[in-house]
Image (tube, coloured by chain):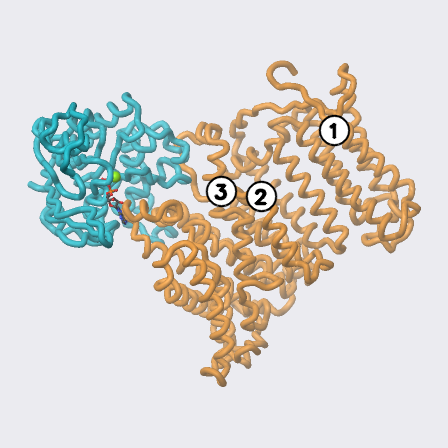
Chain colours: A orange, B cyan
């Protein structure tokens, strides 16, 4: 390679043929690392995940194997193999370095864990030594690679069928990754997974692949939506464990509410600290008409569609009642007033117990015994076997929630990219200027509040059935477990304000990580705070940056590619 | 026919009277200049016209009927403005900025946005076409998909004008449109103002650049300390000694070259 790109290597090595040697060493190291996962890494099955078997990888070895295989693919890119070059549009070296780091950290972590939890290096067997040496060698060789960073012109769009295929492959790959993380059985395995994924994502980030993929997704909106829906539904097929489908259903509820909050916070810029109250309103509305024996309105349950309409209507009403007086104040004041209203909801529900107020909600006892949904004769409480696949109770709700989220995403995307959505963003950007441009700011803010509340209310009516019990304490400003207003806000901000995937991803992470790291127990909030600080320091735009923000960084590139197209709402 | 008829507009902030009984009328197709030293109350007067402030006293009529009280209603009625300190929507694209300007000329609400009927699509397409046309008109058509914040200073001013024009005004209020522009950009701004008049929009422009003011305005009003000092054709105003005095801070009677400070205020 000649020309502008200065060749820099972090580990100095003899200049002649340095690149060739380093590249060969990286490839060999990755291959040996991959091979080592077929050997046992310890002698006792008492280490979580059983790493004693020879012949196939188990537990954390799978993580090492996958990272090593991805590395081998990038080695192919470094060698310029035709099919693989596309993996690293901006150069393979940075990606290989980050991936080597991912390999070393995740493998090193588990090897260290073996030595520590079992008491010393004596618990390493030859396989562990092979793995340790291989990953270390890979890392050193990767650091010695010459820098091959280059400016990549955005690739020309390929044939439609191929792009569609790639979109499906990417989303289904994401599904498999997410499913693996969700279903990790041991803390060690989950930490190894997070370490590997974190470093690998960084690595792929510098390779320029995400920019290509997000452009691909932006070009193929319909295919992406269909693929995402398929991936969502496929999860129900590949994951059958009740514990994990329950977790997944709760993640979806949380994500749905975060998406609703994103209209208020992300698009309109209204800091709402009491948003979880709308989820509560929907859940209580759903519970009251569910036919629960503890509801004031016992008897036959309302059909689901009617319950949903009531849940949405009551939540919108609450949104308007809360919004009408508060939306006249701005900024910090709005945050404080909504915080107050959120707490008022909880206190009111606590007091509508027939003693301190009229009997409606059973006060702190809440409404238990909420029966399962029955839609068109399909009982959500029962197992159903369709084409040999068994759908358990939580899978049923999970599938319903996938549809609910699909509807929400549809509404969010369409409204966000319309006269109404533009007015919301204008209000967020400069309220006075928006007014001067003819935007009735009060009415539009109220509309944002109402639509946000409607989404939370819809999620709430489903949530009541999933959890079977609603109590006032589920709907607080802050508690150790999601959903609560603070976590919802964090999901939106961490995920990416104003985007669709951001809050869903942020919500999933905020829900799953505390669930998986059980040993943090009472330190969960501390962990949560640290994560927030780190994220805001390292990536203030969130995991999924808004396309408007992306424009800030890659303006010429995107403007050139899209010609006369305008930026839509989010990724 | 008069487009704007402001009578006795007064704005008091506590003890300070920023605008005192100012009258101003603008005829169809006219370009009126509003000049005066800093702090004279020019921007405050604009704010009174556009509903950002509610005047303490006075009446503002637009094409014969009283202007409504709230800013978005004023824009709907047909009076649009730009700001002295540019107020774009920085993280929206240039095109989106102009589309927000068209907000009052579109009717599509929440449900038609979700439903996307053919009528909705047509309205949206027409809005985009109109917005692009305005961007070309303002000379920034090539930047439609950049973020507003990344435009040069002069282009941001032009975008603000295009955005205001998107609301289909009958009267455009420009607050120091050439502030911070170089000579070439100022000339282009001048052509733009003349072209706006060419589209049948009356203009009131606040400016400190006298060459600009005397070059484009049909009539000039001078504001000092909240009161209208003089109003008339550019040539008359330029020759008026009170205006020269107001600008140079010397009492009436001293020549413009005289540096001596008199006893008056
Ligand atoms: N909102 C306000 N509150 C108090 N005083 C104000 C306000 N707006 C403007 N003023 C005062 O009114 C006077 C006129 O200001 P302005 O209209 O901005 O002058 P100009 O635009 O002619 O330079 C100034 O003394 C300013 O401090
Ligand atoms: Mg001013």
- Res B148 seen here: yes
The residue marked by circle 3 belongs to what chain? A
Please name the residue that numbered disc 3 is placed on: A546
Image mark for residue A142: 1
Rendering quadrant holding ligand 1: top left
Please name the residue that numbered disc 2 is placed on: A537
Question: What is the crowding at mark 3: few (fewer than 14 residues within 10 Å), some, or many (at least 20)?
Answer: many
Image mark for residue A229: none
Answer left or right for A212 relative to A315.
Answer: right
Extreme-right residue of the structure: A122
Question: SS at mark 3?
Answer: loop
Answer left or right for A463 relative to B226.
Answer: right
For the N terminus of chain A, which image quadrant?
A: top right
Question: What is the crowding at mark 2: few (fewer than 14 residues within 10 Å), some, or many (at least 20)?
Answer: few
Q: Quadrant of residue A393?
A: bottom right
**Distance of label 1 from label 3 (alpha carbons):** 33 Å
């Amino acid at each position: 390679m000649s020309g502008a790109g200065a060749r820099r290597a972090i580990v100095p090595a003899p200049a002649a043929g340095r690149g060739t040697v380093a590249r060969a060493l990286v490839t060999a190291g990755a291959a040996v690392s991959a091979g080592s996962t077929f050997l046992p890494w310890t002698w006792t099955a008492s280490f979580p995940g059983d790493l004693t078997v020879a012949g196939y990888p188990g537990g954390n070895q799978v993580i090492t194997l996958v990272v090593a295989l991805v590395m081998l693919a990038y080695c192919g890119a470094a060698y310029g193999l035709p099919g693989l070059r596309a993996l690293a549009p901006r150069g393979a070296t940075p990606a290989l370095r980050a991936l080597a780091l991912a390999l070393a950290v995740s493998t090193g972590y588990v090897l260290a864990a073996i030595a520590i939890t079992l008491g010393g290096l004596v618990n390493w067997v030859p396989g562990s030594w092979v793995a340790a040496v291989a990953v270390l060698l890979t890392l050193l060789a990767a650091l010695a690679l010459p820098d091959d960073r280059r400016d990549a012109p955005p690739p020309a769009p390929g044939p439609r069928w191929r792009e569609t295929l790639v979109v499906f492959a990417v989303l289904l790959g994401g599904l498999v990754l997410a499913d693996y993380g969700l279903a990790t059985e041991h803390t060690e395995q989950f930490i190894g997974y997070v370490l590997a994924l974190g470093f690998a994502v960084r690595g792929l980030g510098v390779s320029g692949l995400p920019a290509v993929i997000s452009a691909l997704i932006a070009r193929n909106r319909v295919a992406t939506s269909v693929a995402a829906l398929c991936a969502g539904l496929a999860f129900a097929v590949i994951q059958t464990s009740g514990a994990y489908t329950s977790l997944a259903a709760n993640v979806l509820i949380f994500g749905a509410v975060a998406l609703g909050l994103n209209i208020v916070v992300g698009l309109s810029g209204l800091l709402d600290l009491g948003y979880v109250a709308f989820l509560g309103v929907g859940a209580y509305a759903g519970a009251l008409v569910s036919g629960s024996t503890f509801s004031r309105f016992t008897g036959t349950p309302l059909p689901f569609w009617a319950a949903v309409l009531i849940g949405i209507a009551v939540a919108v009403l609450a949104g308007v009642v809360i919004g009408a007086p508060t939306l006249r104040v701005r900024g910090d004041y709005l945050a404080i007033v909504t915080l107050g209203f959120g707490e008022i909801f909880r206190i009111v529900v606590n007091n509508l117990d027939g003693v301190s107020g009229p009997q409606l909600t059973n006060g702190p006892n809440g409404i238990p015994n909420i029966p399962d949904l029955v839609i068109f004769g399909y009982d959500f409480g029962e197992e159903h076997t369709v084409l040999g696949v068994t759908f358990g109770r939580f899978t049923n709700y999970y599938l319903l929630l996938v549809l609910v989220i699909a509807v929400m995403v549809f509404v969010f995307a369409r409204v966000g990219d319309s006269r109404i959505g533009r007015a919301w963003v204008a209000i967020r950007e400069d309220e006075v200027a928006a007014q001067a441009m003819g935007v009735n700011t009060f009415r539009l803010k109220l509309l944002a509040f109402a639509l946000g509340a409607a989404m939370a209310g819809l999620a709430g009516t489903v949530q009541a059935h999933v959890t079977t019990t609603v109590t006032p304490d589920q709907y607080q400003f802050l508690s150790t477990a999601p959903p609560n207003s603070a976590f919802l806000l964090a999901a939106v901000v961490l995920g990416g304000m104003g985007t669709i995937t951001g809050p869903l991803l942020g919500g999933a992470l905020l829900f799953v990580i505390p669930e998986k790291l059980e040993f943090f127990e009472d330190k969960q909030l501390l962990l949560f705070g640290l994560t927030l600080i780190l994220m805001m320091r390292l990536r203030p735009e969130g995991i999924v940056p808004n396309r408007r923000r992306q424009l800030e960084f890659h303006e010429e590139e995107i403007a050139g590619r899209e010609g006369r197209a305008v930026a839509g709402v989010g990724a | 026919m008069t487009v704007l008829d402001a009578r006795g507009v007064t704005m008091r902030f506590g003890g300070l009277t920023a605008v005192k009984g100012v009258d101003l009328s603008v005829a169809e197709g006219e370009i009126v200049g509003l000049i005066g030293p800093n702090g004279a109350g020019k921007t405050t007067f604009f704010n009174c016209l556009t509903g950002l402030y509610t005047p303490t006293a006075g009446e503002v009529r637009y094409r014969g009927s009283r202007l409504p009280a709230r800013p978005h209603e004023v824009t709907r009625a047909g009076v649009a403005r730009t700001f002295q300190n540019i107020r774009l929507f920085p993280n929206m694209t240039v095109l989106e900025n102009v589309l927000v300007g068209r907000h009052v000329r579109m009717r599509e609400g929440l449900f038609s946005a979700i439903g996307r009927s053919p009528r909705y699509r047509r309205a949206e397409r027409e809005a985009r076409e109109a917005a692009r046309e305005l961007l070309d008109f303002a000379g920034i058509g090539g930047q439609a998909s950049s973020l507003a914040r990344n435009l040069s200073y002069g282009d941001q001013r032009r975008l603000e004008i295009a955005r205001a024009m998107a609301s289909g005004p009958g009267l455009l209020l420009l607050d120091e449109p050439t502030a911070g522009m170089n000579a070439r950009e100022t000339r282009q701004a001048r052509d733009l103002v003349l072209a706006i008049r060419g589209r049948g929009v009356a203009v009131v422009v606040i400016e400190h650049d006298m060459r600009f003011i005397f070059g484009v305005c049909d009539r000039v009003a001078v504001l000092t300390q909240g009161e209208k000092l003089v109003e008339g054709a550019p040539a008359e105003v330029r020759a008026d000694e009170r205006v020269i005095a107001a600008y140079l801070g010397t009492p009436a009677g001293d020549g413009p070259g005289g540096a001596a400070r008199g006893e008056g205020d």
